[in-house]
Image: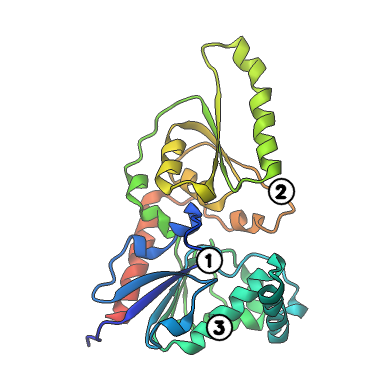
């Protein structure tokens, strides 16, 4: 049965689409797949106005860390708590309340739209999350679920399978066309902060003595902010670097798929470490692309 053309809304976790974070922006599936005859639009989850689209629209939510990876205690995982924290973010812009704001918004969108609700390559969830009713509700109401966590989670409380779908940015042609070129560049690329910039300067200065002694093998250093640099530029710099130091999941993922030497620079006490603890270190580029292609076919079977 063929349905009339509908709008598909691809929502990614970014507050302002004009302020590009290459990792999040390139995790939107609409960059790589055609959904014809349906019309597709890219929107920010955080600023999306649901009343601007017809109610029969399909939703694709992802990729990226849509639900956040904040460690919330189980006794706090109630609808009342989520509402309270969400209102706190809306009224006071408290960044600590951002994950709860997104959870509430996703549930509101699920109730409003009558089309298919698809989660594509979202991340940073663990088995623990399924103890909490608020997460169960999101997963039970979704039509099709693909998350980037490995190994795949299939909790007994759910009535459908959760598919393992790596970040869809693996489908970008610049990764498949990648050829490694050896150089002496050490690349710092990620989410830049004052502390991280200082680490870069310290390492650069520490290598000066070594470079002075060995003039034939001088290391060069470069630092890039993922929030202000295009995907193509980041991949090109990764290509020319012998070592990449990063605090970004996306950069870590791209380097891993390309077989580059990576050093993860992140506080062991940081909640964001969860992203890397659920990373499949056996994954190859070809397999990542294959898994996304298979998930795409499942979606097209649903909306054709």
Give me the disc on residue 107: 3
Give me the disc on residue 292: none
Question: Which comes sooner in the sequence, label 3 or label 1?
Answer: 1
Which residue is nearer to you in this view: 113 or 279?
113
Which residue is nearer to you in this view: 258 or 112?
112
Residue at 48 percent of width and 46 percent of height = 229
Looking at the rendered structure, the secondary structure element under dot 3 is helix
Question: Which comes sooner in the sequence, label 2 or label 1?
Answer: 1
Disc 2: which residue? 267
Q: Are marks 2 and 3 in contact (CB under 8 Å)?
A: no
Give the quarter of the figure containing the N terminus: bottom left
Looking at the rendered structure, the secondary structure element under dot 1 is loop
Question: Which comes sooner in the sequence, label 2 or label 3?
Answer: 3
Residue at 71 percent of width and 42 percent of height = 195
Vertical placement of residue 142 versus 249, above or below: below
2 vs 1, front mark: 1
How many residues crowd mark 2 within 10 Å: few (<14), some (14–19), many (20+)?
Answer: few
How many residues crowd mark 1 within 10 Å: few (<14), some (14–19), many (20+)?
Answer: many
Measured in 3D between alpha carbons, the distance from the residue under mark 2 to the one under mark 3, in whole angstroms, is: 32 Å
Give me the disc on residue 13: 1
The location of residue 266, given as percent across then percent down, is 67, 47
Vertical placement of residue 203 versus 253, above or below: above
Q: Which color mode does the image show?
A: rainbow
């Amino acid at each position: 049965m063929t349905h009339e053309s509908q709008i598909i809304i691809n929502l990614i976790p970014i507050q302002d689409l004009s302020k590009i974070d290459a990792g999040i922006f390139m995790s939107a599936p609409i960059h790589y797949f055609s959904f014809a005859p349906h019309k597709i639009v890219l929107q920010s989850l955080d600023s999306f106005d649901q009343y601007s689209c017809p109610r029969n629209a399909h939703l694709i939510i992802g990729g990226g860390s849509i639900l956040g990876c904040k460690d919330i205690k189980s006794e706090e995982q109630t609808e009342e708590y989520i509402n309270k924290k969400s209102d706190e973010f809306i009224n006071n812009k408290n960044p600590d309340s951002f994950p709860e704001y997104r959870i509430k918004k996703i549930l509101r969108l699920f109730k409003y739209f009558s089309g298919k609700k698809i989660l594509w390559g979202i991340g940073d969830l663990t088995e623990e999350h399924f103890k909490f009713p608020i997460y169960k509700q999101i997963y039970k109401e979704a039509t099709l679920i693909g998350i980037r966590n490995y190994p795949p989670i299939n909790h007994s409380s759910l009535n459908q399978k959760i598919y393992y779908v790596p970040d869809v940015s693996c489908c970008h042609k610049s990764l498949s066309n990648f050829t490694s070129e050896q150089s002496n560049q050490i690349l710092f690329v990620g989410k830049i902060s004052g502390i991280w910039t200082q680490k870069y300067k310290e390492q650069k200065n520490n290598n000066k003595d070594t470079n002075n002694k060995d003039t034939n093998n001088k290391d060069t250093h470069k630092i890039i902010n993922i929030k202000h640099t295009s995907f193509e530029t980041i991949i090109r710099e990764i290509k020319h670097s012998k070592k990449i130091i990063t605090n970004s999941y996306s950069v870590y993922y791209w380097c891993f798929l390309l077989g580059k030497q990576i050093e993860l620079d992140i506080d062991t006490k940081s909640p964001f470490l969860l992203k890397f603890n659920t990373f499949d270190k056996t994954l190859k580029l070809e397999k990542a692309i294959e898994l996304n292609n298979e998930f795409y076919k499942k979606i097209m079977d649903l909306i054709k």
